[in-house]
Amino acid sequence: MPSPTQKRVYNWYISLVAASCMVLYGYDASVFNSLQGSKHWVAYFNTPNSQVIGAINTAYTVGAVVAGFFFGGPLADYAGRRMGMAVGSVLVIIATFMQTFTPRGNMGCFIGGRVLIGIGQGIALTAGPIYIGELAPSEIRGTIMSFWQMFYSVGSFIAYWINYGCQKHPQKLGEWDWKMVVIFQLLMPILILAQIFFIPESPRWYVQNGNRIEDARKSLTKVRDTPQEVEDELLSIREAIEFEAEAISSGYSALWKDKSIRKRMFIAMIVNGGQQISGQGTLNSYSSKIYAKVFKDPAQIALINALNATFGIIFTLNATWTVDRFGRKFLLIVGGIGMAVCMLIVATVETQTATLANGGKSVPVGISIVFLMFLFALFYKPSWGATVWIFTAEIFSMNVRAQAVGMCSQTQNVVNSIVQQFFPTFLDNCGFYAFYMFAGINVLLSAFVWYFVPETKKVTLEEIDTLFGGSNHVETGAEIMGIKDPHHAHMESQTVSEGDDKGENEKRDNEKRDNEKRDNEKRDTETRVNETNVV
C-alpha cells in the first residue's frame, strides 16, 4: 500500500498532467506573437495589415469561446474530465498540421487552423482545472492549482526560446524559421495523450454519472492517505450530489435559476474578463509589435520575449506559497494595484522621452521599459494569472461545475477577442498612451475584488456555496439521506454500492484494525466513528 508521502507525490503528478493543458494555451498564445516578428512569415502571407493580424487572433478566440461555452462542459460531464483533455489535445494536433503546411498565401487555411486550435484548447481548458480542483486535497488545492498558470508560462518559455533560436538563423532556415515554431506545438498534446488514461478519473464524476461508488472509492484511494479520509470525502461527495439532485437543477438552466449560482457567474465572469483587460493578454499577443516601437532588431525582441517567459515561470511560483497563506482576495487586490502602477509608469516613460532617428528609443529608456514590463509580470503571474484560475475552478457546485467553469474561463477569450481586434490599430494611432487605459482598468478591478469577491482558501468544494449565499450542500444532503454526522463516515456500516461484496467489506475492516494498532490517534478517531449512527 503506498505511503502518505507517495500518495501526495502522486497527487502532484496527476495534477501536473492535467495542468499540461495550460502549456497548450501558453505555447499557442506565444506562437502567433512570435510569427509577427518573422519576415518570412510576413512575406509568406503577403504582408497582412493590422486588421488581418487582429482577425487571426480573433479567429482563435472565437473557436475557444464556442468550445468553452457549448462543448467543453457537456463533454466533460458526459465522457469525463480525462476525455475532455484528450479530445482537446487531438484537435490541437490536427490544427498544428493545418497551420504549418498552409499553402503559400492561403490565409483562410491558416485562420481555419487557428479556429480549430481554439476549439481544442477551449475543450481542454474546461476539463483541466475541474479535474485538478476535484482531485486535489482542499488544504493544498490552491498551491497545486497555481501550477496551472505556471504551465502557461512554460508554454510561452518553450515557444519563445524556439523562436529566438530560429530568429538567429533566418537565412539558413528560410520559411522554416516560423514553421519550426508552429510545428513544435505537437510536443505537449502528444505527451498529454500518452498519460491521460493512466491517471484516475474524478471521483465526483463517477458519483454523478451512474452513482459508481466503487469506482469513485478506487480513485480516492489512489490520492488520499487513509481509508477513513476516502470514506469521509466520498460521503461528502454523495451528500452534496444528493442535495443537488433533489433541490437544484443541473445543466445550463441551473446557471440562472439559482440566485447563488447567478451571483458566482457574475463575479467569475468579471474576474476572468478582467484578467485579459489588465494588459497581460495584449502583451502576450502583441509584445513583438509593442517592442518594435522601442527596439529595431528582431532577434533582440525575440530574446526579450524569451527572457520574459523564463521569468514568468519564476514569478508564477510565488503563487504556490502565497495563495493558501494570504488568500485569493489579497493576491488579486495587491496584484491589481501593482499592475496599475507599472502601466502608469511605462506609459509615462515611453511617451515623455525622445525618439531616435531610427524610430527607436535610447538604450536606458529601452531598458527601463523592459524592466517595467517584467515588473508588471511579477505582479500579474501569481495574482490575476494563477489566482483567477484557482478561484474559478473551485467556486461552483458539482451540478454546474463543468458548464460554469467552461463559460467563465472563456469570458477571457470573449474579452480578449475584442481587445485583440482593436489593439493593433489603437497602438498604431496612440502608441504607449494606450497603457494609461490599462492602468485605470487595473485600479477598477482591485476595487471590484475588495467589495464583491469573498475569500475561498481552504474551503472544501462541497461547502463553498455558503460563501455566496447558498445552502451547505453537505449538511443539507446529509439531512436528505438521513445521516446524523455529515462530515464523517462509519466505515463498518457506510452504505456502499450494490456491487460492493463481502470481500471488500472484510478488506476495509482489516485495514481499519491495522491502522488502530499502529496509530493511537487513529484509535481515537475510530472510537468516535463507532459511536456515529449512519443510516
Image (cartoon, grey):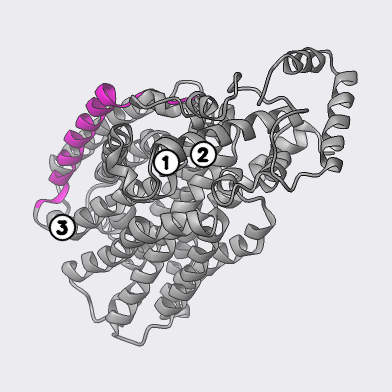
Query: Amino acid under label 2?
Result: Met
Residue 258 horizontal side relative to residue 135, left or right: left
| Magenta highlight range | 430-458
Residue 495 horizontal side relative to residue 473, left or right: right
* Residue 18 within the magenta-colored segment of the rendering: no
Judged from the image, the secondary structure of the residue bearing numbered disc 3 is helix
Q: Nearer the viewer, residue 383 or 350?
A: 383
| Residue 160 in view | no
* Residue 433 within the magenta-colored segment of the rendering: yes
Q: Which mark is residue 156?
A: none
Cα separation, mark 1 vs mark 2, equals 8 Å
Q: Which residue is mark 1?
A: 389
Report the residue that reaches farthest toward the bottom: 103
Cα separation, mark 1 vs mark 3, equals 26 Å
Residue 208 position within the rendered picture, expressed as x and y whole percent measured from the top left:
54, 46
Cα separation, mark 2 vs mark 3, equals 32 Å
Residue 261 position within the rendered picture, expressed as x and y whole percent measured from the top left:
33, 36
Judged from the image, the secondary structure of the residue bearing numbered disc 1 is helix
The reply to whether discs 1 and 2 touch (Cβ–Cβ < 8 Å) is: yes
Q: Which mark is residue 145?
A: 2
Q: Which residue is mark 3?
A: 422
> Up-down: is 469 above or below 82?
above
Query: Amino acid under label 3?
Result: Phe
| Residue 459 in view | yes
Judged from the image, the secondary structure of the residue bearing numbered disc 2 is helix
Instruction: Report crowding for label 3: few under 14, some 14 to 19, many 20 or more residues within 10 A (C-alpha).
Output: some
Instruction: Report crowding for label 1: few under 14, some 14 to 19, many 20 or more residues within 10 A (C-alpha).
Output: many
- Front disc: 1 or 3: 1
Q: Nearer the viewer, residue 484 or 421?
A: 484
Label located before the other in sequence (1 or 3)? 1
What secondary structure characterizes most of the magenta part?
Answer: helix
Query: Amino acid under label 1?
Result: Trp
